[in-house]
Every structure is written in structure tokens, then in C-alpha cells.
Image: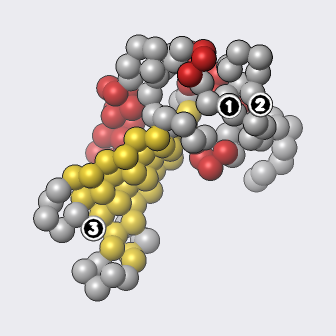
Amino acid sequence: MLTLRVSCAGGMTSTGYIATRTSGTLNRNVRLVDDGHLAALLLRPAMHQPGKGSWYNAVIKLDKFAQLHAVYDYDNPPFAGEVESRFLIEDQRLYPREPATLPLWHPCRPGGPTVVLLNDDDDYY
């Protein structure tokens, strides 16, 4: 099975592959070619829905029978929560959602976020 994980906010996109051998062992050394990364970049804007926005995270799996399975996550923070507010604000501009539907952690939520992800001053590198 081949698993593609995608996480996005604003102009940032992170992609990664994991290949599971038929024996069940993992091969984490799989790398995206330029075309694969480009496809991941194009998928999110193509799936934008007015008022609903677009997903922040996706897991797309191709099984041994060549069946594609995808889960799109609209609610959990991208990059495991390690994202600066400016990227989330840009994301809301690019893929607008109705303000009342924004997750609790989103800085554009009416009244501000009720769950803090990462302070822009935090040093996480």
C-alpha cells in the first residue's frame, strides 16, 4: 500500500509518502517526484467549496488492488498544529469558510481562537 499524507495552510504544503510492503514492513524512504508534489498542490484548490473552504490535511491510500481511498480533514490543524497564524489567515483568504464553521483553533474565528496552537514568537526550529 502506498500512503500519501498532505498538510496545507495558506501557501505552505507538506507532503510525504509511506510504502507498506506486502510483508507489512514499512518503507519510509519513498520520495515524491515533481509531478506527485504538483498533483498534491493542485488537489486542494480544486476541492474548495464556497462557504466550506478546503481541507487542511489529507491521507490518500492506494492499495494493492489499485483502489484509491482518501480521507480529507477539515477540522484538525495542519502541520500537527505547528503553524504560524499568518498562514492560517492567508488560508482563510484563499479558501474562505463561513466564520462560524472555523475550527476552535483558527485565528479568524469570530472572537478569536479558543484553543492556542503556536505563538508566532515561539521558537520551534
Q: Closer to the camera: disc 1 or disc 3? A: 1
Compared to 21, does 46 lie above or below?
A: above
Residue at point 15%, 60% (across, down): 66
Name the residue carrying label 1.
Answer: 104
Label 2 is placed on what type of residue?
A: Thr
Type of amino acid under label 3: Met
Residue 29 x/y as whole percent: 42, 71
- Count numbered badges in the picture: 3
* Secondary element type, mark 1: loop
Between 48 and 18, the one lying in front of the other is 48
Q: Is residue 31 left or right of residue 92?
A: left
Find residue 15 and report its horizontal and vertical position in percent: 45, 50
What number is the disc on residue 9?
none
Choose top left, top right, bottom left or bottom right for residue 21.
bottom left
Reading the chain from its start, which is encountered first: label 2 or label 1?
Answer: 1
The extreme left residue here reads: 65
Kindly identify the residue that appears in the image at 45 percent across and 21 percent down: 52
Q: Which mark is residue 114?
A: 2
For the residues labelled 2 and 1, say whether their Cβ atoms are less than 8 Å apart.
yes
